[in-house]
């Protein structure tokens, strides 16, 4: 169980009966045989697209609280890879046969998009991390199902669901956009002539709410990047939540040996309003866990998922003179790696950028810049980088120092 008896922890480490496993949260591993005295706890998971709230608690107190920030660049990286491969095919050959039968969707049933797979993986990894340091007997996960049609039109009901915005134009998005815009340019209002349907970035394969009608002159300006349209509200986050919820629950039941229960957002809201608890990811996870008699501290761990690898070895565009520049920096610079936890002038931060000369860009996880050019000689290594970075915070502000009330987790 997590302990606040720091004297005992220091004596165990000094006597060689334990070793430090992790700095944040501070975790030690016992090297001696001891009796097991644990009280089972419940973990509550507030699922989300950008942030995950997770709290492990028992009837007396909260044992662990964390908020994890997820990656949002998966789709952008996949598109960049697609564009690079497409241009490479045209450079190498004048024509290449389409490989329509070699698609992962047709080979693997139940295939999910990479961004969805990433979301599910991070959720399950965070639950597994908590179970590695706290004895968990039950997992409660909040699932959410959104009615996109109801969000767009709050008055829809009954047979109204059969008449969507594209009713009658299911197979022809271009005609729907032209009719919606009245066959006139959305930017200059010109009617007649040749009309184009695309987004403000020049793309045509998007949802109808991202497409606009342009005249020939405005379309050329769009291709040059001279026109920027106001983007409408996107429904990607609620759509992703609806896709991932069933798969995540199924995989959680297959992965973990403890019971997995699901709750709804309506139940979480009811508990939060009855207890007059402020809305946040940590507080929602506390309500989901169900141990409402426990006292929730303002301190929590902020965790951020970062990219594991940069797989592009070379720059896409060659330099003048035919020089192909490497796209990756050295893995180690004077013993320091990217995203290492370091101490600089008494502040704990992370390496977000490094130069071969030994000067680093140091920042906190919220983006606060500590130093843009810190010498490696004035930097002390605390812990090597992980796929998820962790720092201690207080709800409302950032606190990276380990306070006196932070518990120590012991693994036998």
Image: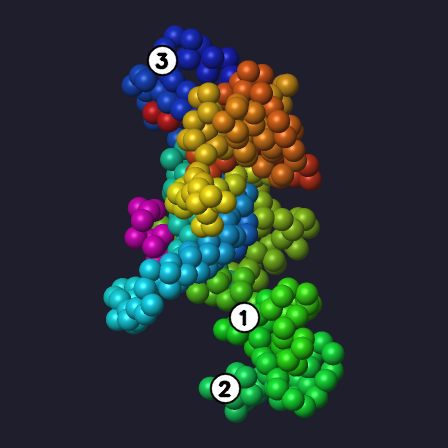
Determine whether, in the image, residue 273 is placed left or right of residue 291.
right
Nearest to the observer: residue 129 or residue 81 = 81
Q: How crowded is mark 1: few (under 14 residues within 10 Å), some or many (20 or more)?
A: few
Residue bounds of the magenta highlight: 244-258
- Residue 313 percent coordinates (x, y): 39, 43
Judged by depth in the image, the label closer to the viewer, 1 or 3, is 1
Is residue 129 visible from the viewing direction of this image?
yes
- Of labels 2 and 1, earlier in sequence is 2
Of all residues shown, which one is farthest toward the top?
Answer: 15
Q: Is residue 299 magenta?
A: no
**Disc 3 target residue:** 17
Q: Which residue is drawn at 37% across and 16% down?
A: 18
Quadrant where the N terminus sits is top left
Q: Residue 172 carries which label?
A: 2
Mark-to-mark CA distance, 2 and 1: 16 Å
Quadrant where the C terminus sits is top left
Q: Is residue 252 magenta?
A: yes
Mark-to-mark CA distance, 1 and 3: 62 Å
Q: Is residue 392 above or below residue 324?
A: above
Judged by depth in the image, the label closer to the viewer, 2 or 1, is 1
Nearest to the observer: residue 84 or residue 164 = 84
Q: Residue 203 carries which label?
A: 1
Q: Which residue is drawn at 32% across and 18% down?
A: 31
Scheme of image coloration: rainbow
- Residue 304 percent coordinates (x, y): 52, 41
SS category of the residue bearing label 1 = loop
**CB of mark 1 within 8 Å of CB of mark 3?**
no
- Of labels 1 and 3, earlier in sequence is 3
Q: Is residue 11 above or below residue 107?
A: above
């Amino acid at each position: 169980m997590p302990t606040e008896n720091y004297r005992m922890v220091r004596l165990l480490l000094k006597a060689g009966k334990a070793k430090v496993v992790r700095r944040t949260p501070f975790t030690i591993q016992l090297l001696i045989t001891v009796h097991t005295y644990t009280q089972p706890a419940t973990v509550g998971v507030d699922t989300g697209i950008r942030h995950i709230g997770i709290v492990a608690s028992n009837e007396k107190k909260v044992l662990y609280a964390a908020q994890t920030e997820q990656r949002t660049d998966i789709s952008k990286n996949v598109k960049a890879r697609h564009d690079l491969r497409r241009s490479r095919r045209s450079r190498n050959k004048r024509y290449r046969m389409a490989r329509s039968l070699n698609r992962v969707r047709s080979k693997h049933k139940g295939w999910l998009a990479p961004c969805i797979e990433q979301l599910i993986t991070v959720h399950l990894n965070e639950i597994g991390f908590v179970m590695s340091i706290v004895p968990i007997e039950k997992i409660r996960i909040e699932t959410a199902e959104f009615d996109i049609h109801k969000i767009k039109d709050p008055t829809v009901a009954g047979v109204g669901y059969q008449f969507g915005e594209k009713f009658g134009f299911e197979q022809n998005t271009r005609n729907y956009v032209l009719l919606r815009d009245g066959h006139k340019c959305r930017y200059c209002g010109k009617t007649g002539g040749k009309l184009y349907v695309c987004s403000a970035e020049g793309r045509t394969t998007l949802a109808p709410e991202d497409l606009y009608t342009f005249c020939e002159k405005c379309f050329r300006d769009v291709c040059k990047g001279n026109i920027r349209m106001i983007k409408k509200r996107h429904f990607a986050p609620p759509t992703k939540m609806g896709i991932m919820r069933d798969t995540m629950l199924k995989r959680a039941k297959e992965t973990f040996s403890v019971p997995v229960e699901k709750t709804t957002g309506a139940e979480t809201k009811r508990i939060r309003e009855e207890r007059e608890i402020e809305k946040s990811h940590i507080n929602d996870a506390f309500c989901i866990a169900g141990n409402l008699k426990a006292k929730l501290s303002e301190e929590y761990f902020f965790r951020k998922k970062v990219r594991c690898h940069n797989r592009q070895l070379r720059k896409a565009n060659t330099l003048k003179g035919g020089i192909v520049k490497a796209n990756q920096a050295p893995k180690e610079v004077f013993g320091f790696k990217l995203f290492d936890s370091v101490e600089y002038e008494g502040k704990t931060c992370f390496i977000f950028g490094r130069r071969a000369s030994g000067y680093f860009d140091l920042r906190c996880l919220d983006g606060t810049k500590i130093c843009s050019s810190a010498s490696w000689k004035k930097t002390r290594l605390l812990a090597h980088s992980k796929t998820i970075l962790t720092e201690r915070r207080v709800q409302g502000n950032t606190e990276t120092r380990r306070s006196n009330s932070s518990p120590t987790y012991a693994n036998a």
